[in-house]
Amino acid sequence: MKIKILIIISLILSLFLFVAGCKGASRVNTYVIGRDPTWYPLDLMGKQNNVYGFSTDLFQAVAKIENLLLQLDSTGWNQIIPGLKSGTFDGALTSMTPTPMNEADYDFSEPFLSLGPVLIVKNVSPYHSLEDLSEKIVGVSTFNNSDELIVQKVGTIVIKPYENLSLALQDLSQGKIDGAVMGKVIAETYLKDLYRGQLRIATPPLNKKGLRLMVLHRQEIELIEAFNRGLEQIKRDGTYRQLLEKWNLSN
């Protein structure tokens, strides 16, 4: 009788451990990610839906490679941080740039969409960097101090401020200035529509601004590591470039 009881107890314990193990394994690979579909406070020149679709496809591609279940939940921009802190979200998509100050509270992935400023020049010009524009005139937005600071690092550049960046590109196309610096998405929108064949982007993004996956500091580190691995893989195999082109986010 005692042997039968011990066998029953052993079977029950084994079943319990199996179920618990299955739940634990499921929890490791399942994540809820908060995402604000307006991407506030970014100015995406009407491409909010493009970025939304791009991020959806990109996370699906990464999830497939890394054997993850990634659920992207729409939420208001002001609910991202509270959602992370309350545990509603395991991670969130953010335009916050990693700094020593915010990295004390959050961990960030590599950017999955670069949004930093780029240099625009005439298509026939020989310029390929800000340094090439020494003693030349470069237009920047009066409302974006970070872009102006980047240009100021080349102390010999003459900075011309513009309240409207479309006027900067108009002056550039007419040869009144030698270059213009503005956000990558804004630049690509103008160059595809109004200045195709006249102007070109001469540099990669000039700072680390971009969209990233963010988690609370020292929590869900495995999610960040898996996402970075998957992102690197889809960049190597060409999937990333295809997604940029699909969603009209590549010049």
Image (cartoon, grey):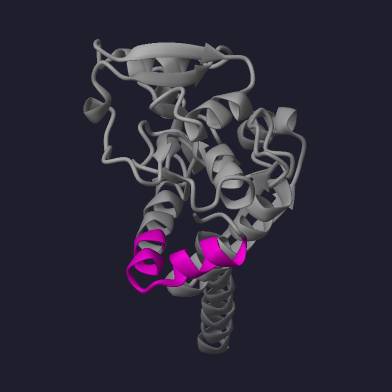
What quarter of the picture does the N terminus occupy? bottom right
Q: Give the range drawn in magenta.
A: 231-247
Residue at 62 percent across and 15 percent down: it is 163
Q: Is residue 155 above or below residue 176?
A: above
Camera-side residue: 39 or 22? 39
Residue 33, position in %: x, y?
62, 50
Q: In this view, does 158 lie above or below 64?
A: above
Residue at 43 percent across and 57 percent down: it is 227
Camera-side residue: 61 or 29? 61
Q: Is residue 4 above or below residue 115?
A: below
Q: How would you classify the magenta stretch by its main secondary structure?
A: helix
Q: Is residue 232 magenta?
A: yes
Residue at 58 percent across and 72 percent down: it is 16
Q: Quadrant of residue 128?
A: top left
Residue 239 shows in this picture: yes
Q: Is residue 243 magenta?
A: yes
